[in-house]
Image (spheres, coloured by chain):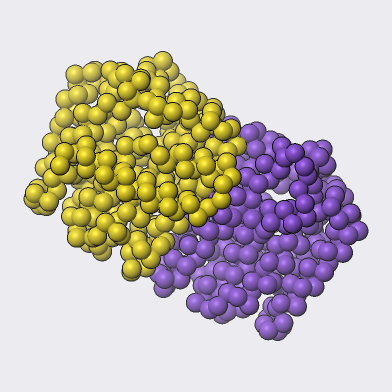
Chain colours: A yellow, B purple
Amino acid sequence: MTFQTALAEAAGRVQACLATELQGYGNEPVIAAMRYAVTGGKGLRGLLVMESARLHDVPESQSVWAAAAVEAVHAYSLVHDDLPAMDDDDLRRGQPTVHVRWDEATAILAGDALQTLAFDLLAREGCAPDPARRVALIATLAEAAGARGMVLGQAQDIAAETAAAPLTLAQITELQANKTGALIRWSAEAGARLAGADPAPLSAYATALGLAFQIADDILDVEGDAETAGKRLRKDEDAGKATFVSLLGLDGAKARAAALVEEAEEALSPFGATAGTLRAAARFVIAREK
Amino acid sequence: MTFQTALAEAAGRVQACLATELQGYGNEPVIAAMRYAVTGGKGLRGLLVMESARLHDVPESQSVWAAAAVEAVHAYSLVHDDLPAMDDDDLRRGQPTVHVRWDEATAILAGDALQTLAFDLLAREGCAPDPARRVALIATLAEAAGARGMVLGQAQDIAAETAAAPLTLAQITELQANKTGALIRWSAEAGARLAGADPAPLSAYATALGLAFQIADDILDVEGDAETAGKRLRKDEDAGKATFVSLLGLDGAKARAAALVEEAEEALSPFGATAGTLRAAARFVIAREK
């Protein structure tokens, strides 16, 4: 099975879980907007949860809940990030963004409710029979998503737009570790937490992967095709923002991303062949076109 | 001790808990905005948590976490509700709203992170040593706050503004049971959940209290003084929206609120004198001036 097939299959399972869940909700626009927002993503974070769970012999019937939770958080962050007061984007995954398709109020509320849904899903018995493991997932997701993780990174990103000087490499690295890295780390460590195992062996993988992902995003922003990516590109350049590409050069950024992918693969050696899909995920994040 | 003193003391403890918590965060504007948003509220929901906990012999050192969590959710909902795309309010608790004091992006992010913080607080061991009880609080808060509770109510409220016909009494009652009732019910039932007890005896109290609260809000919107209330009033009338006052008349609404308070007090009879503050809370919601 190719990595693309594995990714599509995992995304299909996560989206089916979310769709079934949202069937129990009403038919208000805010709920239609939630359904729309969780549809059509790559599903990388969900795959990381399910693959790290598989490494620890946690069945998919359990890990799909945590995978759905992190994809709900990711979807909420995109809906809010696309708002006019934030990045002001009209296009996402090749489709109109939520506030364009509906309106800003619906986008704010749909994002809010998607975040709530994530914690709701992690609290389910199906996620982990032992409530202590569910609590561990909830506590760590809250840390990764909140004002010491993803939201802090988004705020730092906004502050960078009006900063007197462009950010340094150290500052960009910290910003991205918060903005996208924290959720990716949570995803790759979730399998260990579901199993009550030590997440440390997966941390090195997850940290390298998260940084490689963001460097690849910056490369994609410069080299990518907006139609293939399904979103607006060259935003950072237009905004005069420092990126890994502006700081390292295009070749330097590519070399750094490749080194990080090697580092990520290396970190998986204790897991042997079982970690094949996670290794492929690391190679995928720097090869993707969207 | 008067009820006002009890309320102020509980609010002080909850705000101290939140302030200590946020000290561990950075100094970015988004974190300053979070601090600002959790300051100065009445703290009714937090008091309901702490008093229902006291009825079940749960110490304040525990219940303050759940009280802080629900006040964080309440604060997030106000920050987002005040945004230009939602209610577009400049004044809250007598102070400029978060998007006026900072900007819209900071208000969106601060609200997002306050919601995350709520689940973070409920996941703490200090909240309840038994993780199963923490999970029960998290699951029920997610239900009360999300797209089957508070957010659904907010969406229904927005939809009502452009509806062809004003809402009926049944529709307003359902809307308000979601918009403000769900969080008030969660608060009043939280003490039982912290103790691993059946929350049903508190449900009748909480449901009557939640509805009385909203009828009182509609009365305040008509009769109140904006300076005392610390927010813009006569919004519903200006928007031509149906309210309990427009549907029942001012005297009818007052009579209904008073009957609900009696009902709420009656529901507390199994708890005897220990429930004195919860009884006073019911009387307070229809007598308050803000």
Q: Is residue B272 left or right of residue B133?
A: right
Res. A122 in view: yes
Q: Nearer the viewer, residue A269 or A287?
A: A287
Rendering coords of residue A108 (x, y %): 55, 39
Res. B34 in view: no
Residue at image coords 62%, 59%: B182
Residue at image coords 19%, 39%: A3
Q: Dividing the image into 4 quarters, which one contains the N terminus of chain B?
A: bottom right
Q: Is residue B10 left or right of residue B134?
A: right
Rendering coords of residue A69 (x, y %): 39, 51
Residue at image coords 45%, 21%: A164
Vertically, is B58 above or below A129? below
Vertically, is B81 above or below B20? above
Residue at image coords 81%, 54%: B244
Q: Is residue A179 left or right of residue A50?
A: right
Q: Work out which residue is located at the far right of the displayed protein and give it.
A: B251
